[in-house]
Image (cartoon, grey):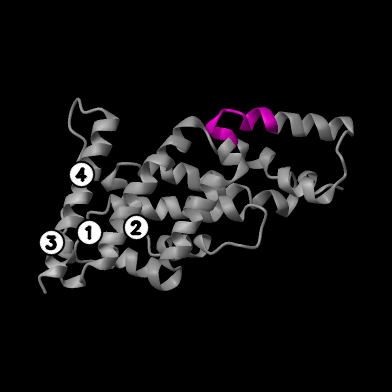
Amino acid sequence: QSQSKSLGSGAGSKIWLQPIFLKLLIVWLADCRAAVSSFLEAPAHLPYMVELLNTVDSPASVHVSGLAAVLLGECVLYNTSIESAHSAHVLVDIISQQVGLSTYFARWEALQNNHVFLMAMTGNAHQKSSEIVLEEESGLSSGNGEVEFETSDVGPVAGVYDTYLVKLIQKLEPIVRDTIVQLFSQPKAKASLLPSVPDRKGGESESDYINRLKELMQKQTAEMQVSFLSR
């Protein structure tokens, strides 16, 4: 029995539920500080996110760890806690100590370079999923184990990536990266002085909002460099 068929039933199918749930959480937390605060209030959520970030032993690993990285990035970006166990600075420390910043950013990169994500960017993921199902049902599969593993995750996970999620992940990645780098390089004593991420203004377009956030990040980086050089 092929691997792709085995994933459709029993324990194999359960690994594909994680990307689905992670997608729902990412959409829920997007640009919503109240949702982030509520999510982090549950003691088990943060350790579980770290566990998912370190997932490496299943066909769904790149999707689970990548989407967990996106979710945790939202928790940093839209964090309103200043002095608590769930502040943005504490979350960055946890990423650094339990995952590693290079590994964390590599999860984003691996997700966005995955063939299923790339197909979703062009709207071909669902089409490819249907082709694989038809190929299996008609017995036209090549039987090559290596190729089968390459495409076996298209069917189960194709529905996770729609246009909204793909664009959201692409929009968040540079902003989350800049925010985490700044928090990591700034002393903890000054963490409370960091301004929160500004809300989107009424009537402000998405592109203008992103540009305003980038300008804010660049300004903060310049101030940090001046502060460092003056020591």
Q: What residue lies at 62% left-to-right and 29% top-to-bottom?
A: 124
CA–CA distance in space, label 1 to label 3: 12 Å
CA–CA distance in space, label 2 to label 3: 21 Å
Element class at badge 1: loop
Mark 2 and mark 1 in contact? Answer it, CB < 8 Å. Answer: yes
Instruction: List the residue tagged with mark 2.
Output: 40
Sequence-first tag of 4 and 2: 2
**Residue 81: assigned label:** 1
Element class at badge 3: helix
Element class at badge 4: helix
User: Mark 4 belongs to which amino acid?
Assistant: Glu
Pick the front one: 230 or 167: 230
Q: Is residue 10 left or right of residue 186?
A: right
**Residue 215: assigned label:** 4
Which circle, 2 or 1, is nearer the viewer?
1
| Membership of 229 in magenta stretch | no
CA–CA distance in space, label 1 to label 4: 23 Å
